[in-house]
Amino acid sequence: MAIIESDAHYRDILRRIAALEALVAGVRAIQAEAIAERALGRLTDEDVRDVGDEGPLGDAVANLTYTLKNLSSDAADWEAFADYGARTVAGVAGGGA
């Protein structure tokens, strides 16, 4: 878990999450296209295996997904901390705790 130091750092993490999600979606689109091309006889089983989940591209997606999970967890932690801080400030301002 990373330590988020500021709102700017948090926004940077959100940008990274969006970029990684787009990258994973792009890889999934490539995989779907390869499967379709195989069905049309334009690619071999080996070609499809190279871009499938068991091949190098699949390994890359697994690593990206792991990184996404960690970044999303960090962002959720920051959101919970910020929400707690806002509720605490509101409670103090309202006279409660």
Image: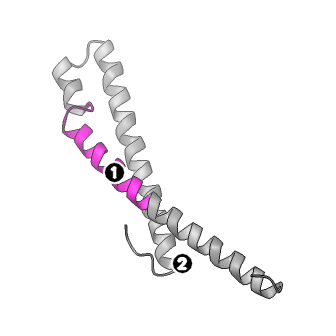
Residue ID at (28%, 17%)? 38
Specify whether residue 59 is painted magenta.
yes
What's under tag 1, amino acid-wise? Tyr
Total numbered labels? 2
Left or right, residue 95 beside residue 1: right
Residue 81 place in picture, x, y as percent: 57, 73
> In the image shown, does 13 or 82 lie closer to the viewer?
82
The residue at the far front in this view is 97
Q: Which residues are magenta?
A: 52-71
Dividing the picture into quadrants, the one containing residue 30 is top left
Left or right, residue 84 beside residue 22: right
What residue is disc 2 on? 7
Residue 9 in the image: above or below residue 28: below
Upstream in sequence: badge 2 or badge 1? 2
Examine the residues drawn in magenta and state their main secondary structure.
helix
User: Could you tell me which secondary element the residue under label 2 belongs to?
Assistant: helix
Mark 1: few, some, or many residues within 10 Å (few <14, many ≥20)? few
The residue at the far right in this view is 94
Residue ID at (19%, 39%)? 56
Left or right, residue 81 beside residue 35: right
What's under tag 2, amino acid-wise? Asp
Dividing the picture into quadrants, the one containing residue 88 is bottom right
Residue 3 place in picture, x, y as percent: 40, 75
User: Could you tell me which secondary element the residue under label 1 belongs to?
Assistant: helix
Specify whether residue 63 is painted magenta.
yes
Residue 59 in the image: above or below residue 45: below
Q: CA distance from mark 2 to mark 1?
A: 23 Å
What residue is disc 1 on? 66
Mark 2: few, some, or many residues within 10 Å (few <14, many ≥20)? few
